[in-house]
Image (cartoon, helix red, strand yellow):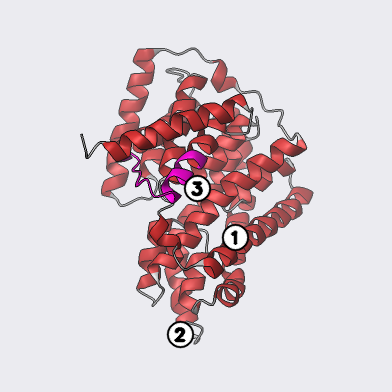
Amino acid sequence: MQRLLPYLLCLALAAPGGALFAWLHTPLPWLLGAMTATAAGQLCGLGLRAWRPARNAALLLIGAALGLFFTPEAGRHLAEHAALVLGAALATLAIGVLLSPLLARLGRLDRPTALFGSIPGGVAEMSVLGESYGARPIPVAVIQMLRVVGVVVILPSAFAALGITGQIPAAALARPLWWPGLALMLALGGACTWVLIRLNIRNAWLLGALFVSLGLTASGHELSGIPPWMTAAAQLCMGAALGAQFERRAFRGGTRLLLAAVLHVLLLTALCAVLALGLSWGAELGLATLILATAPGGVAEMSLTAKTLALDVPIVVAFHLVRIALTAVLVQPCAELLRRGGYL
């Protein structure tokens, strides 16, 4: 029972937090409410732990739900903007690299730590890869974590305050729940996830179900819809997992680092929004969709925001998946060039 206590406490805080935010009608209430409550408990020293299998199951469900938006019409629409998706992903990575000297100065960080903290990538990946170039893994992890959390809080809140919503019909939400079809879709998603894990692919739990659901939907096979209460439960698990990362030891004696990281995420988000504004002038895509698509947040969180606000989910998902792929491919060669050039 003693071993279960941190997990039970995490759930005991996450569920009321999500319910409170839902009652207050905030954007992404179950995710943000659970994250806020568990982060507060963690910073108070409660020693919370989020159950990883629950988080993985939540990502599997979210991936399946997002794939339902990839209708044949959405696929054709996405293919028309392939060049835009690639260019925007490269620009987002470039913004992260260009902001790294400022982050180094503000946070009094060495150049490798600032670089791998500034590039919008995964927390674990950037920490491990950065360490091989002399970066300090803990500051990198803190900066990356605050970036993901900060963007999750900033953009949905700003959109809600401005009353921004889309006009994309939530066709996937109208599909009836059919338990055998849902079970089959999730089982196939789990099998695809296992393959991606064996291939060391990032975000395997999200992508496995997404690829299966996307393939079925794009080919005209609709096995089942996913009701809102299921996605709410998935958001709760995701929020608890994010909030549980706020361990006190990571923030001790790092006031300057925290202030620098907060300013960095504000600047990074603002510059990516400017990028979205520029892209909107030459593309037949809404500005709100492009802001979410170019935002330096996580694919699951940004795609959920697009889904909640009835924006173009396939576009947002595609932008982030391409950015993730390019990050995995380009960060190490870029670091090598900077090291040879004497920057690192």
User: SS at mark 3?
Assistant: helix
Do the numbered discs 3 and 2 sit on residues whose CB atoms are within 8 Å?
A: no
Q: Residue at x 50, y 62 (%)?
A: 143
Q: Please tell me which residue lies in front, 74 or 237.
A: 237
> Quadrant of the rendered structure where residue 72 is?
top right
Q: Mark 1 against mark 3, which lies toward the viewer?
A: 1
Q: Secondary structure at mark 2?
A: helix
Q: x, y (%) of residue 48?
A: 35, 43
- Tell me the residue that label 1 is attached to: 262
Tell me the distance, in whole angstroms, between the alpha carbons under discs 3 and 2. 29 Å
Q: How far from the left and from the top, in percent, is residue 148?
A: 52, 51
Q: For the residue marked with disc 3, what is the amino acid? A: Leu
Q: Quadrant of the N terminus?
A: top left
Numbered circles on residues, count: 3
Label located before the other in sequence (3 or 2): 3
- Of tags 2 and 1, the one toward the viewer is 1
Q: Earlier in the sequence, mark 1 or mark 3?
A: 1
Towards the viewer: 36 or 202? 36
Q: Say whether residue 281 is left or right of residue 93.
A: right
User: Which stretch is magenta?
Assistant: 36-52
Is 245 placed above or below 238 here?
below
Q: Which residue is label 2 attached to?
A: 340
Badge 1 marks a residue whose secondary structure is helix
**Disc 1 residue crowd, few under 14, some 14–19, many 20+, Cα 10 Å:** some
Check disc 2 and give the amino acid type.
Arg
Q: Which residue is mark 3?
A: 321
Query: Looking at numbered disc 1 in the image, what kind of residue is underneath it?
Result: Val
Residue 38 within the magenta-colored segment of the rendering: yes
